[in-house]
Image (spheres, rainbow, N blue to C red):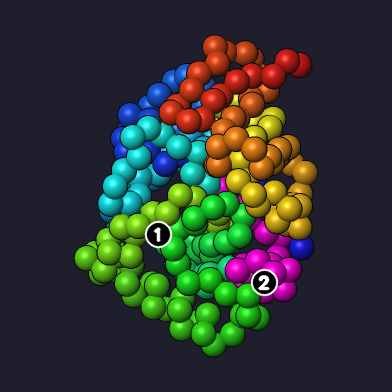
Amino acid sequence: MRLRLDHLIIRTAEPQKTLAELARRAGAPVLSEVEELVGGIESGSVRAGPLDLEVFKIGGIPPERPLGYGLGFVADVPLIEAVGELRALGFPVSAPAPAAAGERRWRTAQIHGLLPNPLPVPASTRPPGVRDRMASVAAGTLGRIPVLARAGTNDAGDSLVLLGEYEFDAAARRAAAGSGPAVARVELGAAGHRDAWGRLPLGDEVDLTVRDDGPPGITRVLFAGARRKPFSLGAVRFEWVSG
């Protein structure tokens, strides 16, 4: 099994403003305008080469500035199989849960042990089984009841690492939006979890540089292609590399 980096997650209190600034300053086409998902979560994204850059509003207390909150991966095997393999490697992983935006449907599981203070959801290292199926059904039910969904996402923690599986043609949708600037490298502060990243079965499509020093989360994104002026969105710096 190999994991491929699929999207970066920037947490913000003002998703519309952050998305517009990111699209303008990076020269990246908007893939999804900001829309509410469940529990007061709002999400929108731009396209940057092989990745989506997602802006994400979550939690009862919004951050004072945009933060490099997390990362999303996809696997080259079915999601439940990937969950089992990661748990066998010692990573606590949540049960896959359904999500939706309009007619688009997907499922995600959360991987703990990679960044500090992750979004608090139950996660296990047991092989997937009946408990996971029950937890997945419960998550889908709670997500359809707004007051319960909001309660479940009120505490956003400090990080989010997702493993997802799309149930729609994500590649066609992305191709229609355009590619934007390609992401050449992502720099990440792991705050003591760097060794865990070394055990993760990652592909090499995007260079992911992980450090234990410095602030946690995504700290810098390097683009390739036509150069633009470097800029920052809160704690995340965006720059261009030569060549």
Q: Quadrant of residue 12?
A: top left
- Residue at 73% across / 53% down in the picture? 195
Q: Look at mark 1 in the image and give the residue it sits on.
A: 100
Q: Residue at x 54, y 25 (%)?
A: 237
Vertical order, 52 against 109 (above or below):
above
The image quadrant that residue 135 belongs to is: bottom left
Please check the rendered image and state whether residue 82 is part of the magenta-colored stretch, yes or no: yes
Compare marks 2 and 1 and give the one earlier in the sequence. 2
Numbered disc 1: secondary structure: strand
The N terminus, quarter of image: bottom right
The answer to whether 63 appears left or right of 70 in the picture is: left
- Residue 34, horizontal then vertical, whole percent: 35, 41
The amino acid beneath tag 1 is Ala
Residue 19 in sight in this render:
no
Please tell me whether residue 113 belongs to the stretch shown in magenta. Answer: no
Per the image, the residue denoted by label 2 is 87
- Taking depth in this image into account, of 160 and 98 the one nearest to the observer is 160
Relative height, residue 49 to residue 8 (above, below) = above
